[in-house]
Image (spheres, rainbow, N blue to C red):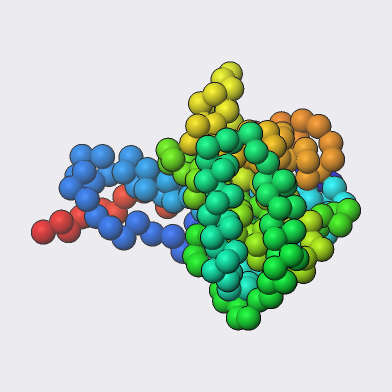
Amino acid sequence: MSIEKIVQDTIKSSINDFFEGKEVKVEHVLDLIFPKERRIRSLIGGLETSLGTRLWEPLAKAFAQEGGFTVLNEKTFNESVPVIPKSIRNYLSDLSDKKKNNPSLKLSDFEESLREFINTNNVKPKDFQKIPKGEGVDIWLKKDNIEYLIDIKTTQINAGSGPKFTTNMLNWIAYQLLKDNSIKSKCILAFPFNPHTGQDFWAREGGKSSPLIPSCEALVGDEFWDMLYGKKNTTALIFKEFEKLGQNDFGSQFNSVFEPPGKYNLE
């Protein structure tokens, strides 16, 4: 199957799955003035939010397979990780502070520092636990003896989110090294595309993901997709399939979902 067919099928599936049995159950006073427009806002907003798990993650795995990566089960990673001992927690806190004060420091250097600390102090995990919700890995890959731990975000993140992402990634590295001190990991924060047409994404959004290094620890668009697929201009390939579906009026089959009911009961 061609990569174009994989992309188009994944887009279709993600949208079909979202709208299956979908209803707008919450009524609002604005329904009396903008009945259809509010339903569109509600449904399309929900669809946008769902694309992370329904579209971008499956697509990333498909591109990674085509690019020679082994796709591992992220649920296995997230369901059972070592409880990080206090000595490692303190060490990670120091590393996090250093990163915040000097964003040019690389997580890969911290990994080697932590590897040495664990070896020198002979730290062993005693218990295992599930990663707290919102702190886990979205995609887990392996290639050339390097494991890739990836968090896919929407193109709009909250200001000041970078330190939290950094902490999560340092924890991922610690989990890996406590399980197997020989593992090499690469942590990535990924944005599927640049919503700022004609503008530099990192000039607009880079401050929000700091202290992660743009185009290195945080990737956007082609930086991410090209890495997975091993070919250039991959984002355009994805967008082309969206365009084809639009030209073929794919969305018209969902028109009835956006039609308001005949009567609202707001009392």
Query: Which one is in front, 151 or 172?
Result: 172
Quick check: can you spot residue 214? yes
* Residue at far front of view: 120
Question: Hey, which quadrant is residue 246 in on the image?
Answer: top right
Left or right? Give the position of 73 relative to 134: right
* Residue at far bottom of view: 126
Quick check: can you spot residue 13? no
Query: Which one is in front, 60 or 128?
Result: 128
* Residue at far top of view: 198
Query: Which one is in front, 267 or 116?
Result: 116
Kindly identify the residue that appears in the image at 78 percent across and 45 percent down.
228
Kindly identify the residue that appears in the image at 31 percent across and 60 percent down.
25
Q: Position of residue 249 (x, y in %)?
A: 59, 39
Q: Position of residue 2 (x, y in %)?
A: 84, 46
Q: Position of residue 65 (x, y in %)?
A: 82, 54
Is 41 situated above or below 85? above
* Residue at far left of view: 267
Question: Hey, which quadrant is residue 121 in on the image?
Answer: bottom right
Left or right? Give the position of 255 relative to 6: left
Is 43 situated above or below 133? above
Left or right? Give the position of 43 relative to 196: left
Q: Position of residue 229 (x, y in %)?
A: 81, 43
Query: Which one is in front, 53 or 38?
Result: 53
Is 241 situated above or below 129? above
Kindly identify the residue that appears in the image at 74 percent across and 58 percent down.
116
Left or right? Give the position of 187 relative to 29: right
Kindly identify the residue that appears in the image at 77 percent across and 69 percent down.
180
Is 150 situated above or below 198? below
Count all numbered tags in the image, as a single digit. 0
The quadrant the C terminus occupies is bottom left
